[in-house]
Image (cartoon, rainbow, N blue to C red):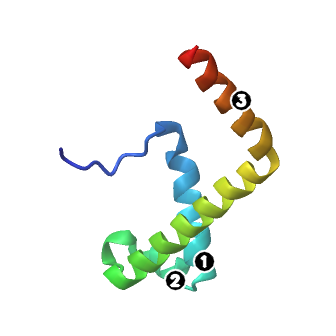
Amino acid sequence: MARSNKPVNPGAENALDRMKLEIASELGIADRVRSQGWSTMTSADCGRVGGHMVRRMIEQYESGLSGSTAGATSGTLTSQSNING
């Protein structure tokens, strides 16, 4: 199966681009990105930005789970027990 670089949610593409530029700014490479574009960036710089993006998305997901873990877990268990009869 071929891999795709398209977001799972196409509406998230703009948010991902904003996050990418925000992280590039934090790493001090945003000026180069704005003036030269992503295609001129080294693979190390792109990898660094991508790694920070993944970490940030995981943190956001986990913080979202922390407030609703009990409800989500009990709902899932209830649904499974209803399915199994």
Q: Please tell me which residue lies in front, 50 or 21.
A: 50
Crowd class of label 3 (few under 14; some 14 to 19; many from 20; radius 10 Å): few
Q: Which residue is disc 1 drawn over?
A: 25
The label number, if any, that marks residue 29 in the structure image: 2
Asked if residue 34 shows in the view, the reply is no
Question: Which of the image's four quarters has the C terminus?
Answer: top right
Vertical side of 53 occupied by 79: above or below:
above
Q: Nearer the viewer, residue 82 or 5?
A: 82
Give the number of callouts. 3
Q: Is residue 65 above or below residue 19?
A: above
**Image x and y of residue 77, in percent:** 66, 31
- Secondary structure of the residue carrying tag 1 is helix
- Describe residue 69's horizontal placement relative to residue 4 as left or right: right
In this rendering, position of residue 64 left or right of residue 85: right
| Mark 1–mark 3 distance (CA, rounded to whole Å) | 41 Å
Residue 50 visible in the picture: yes
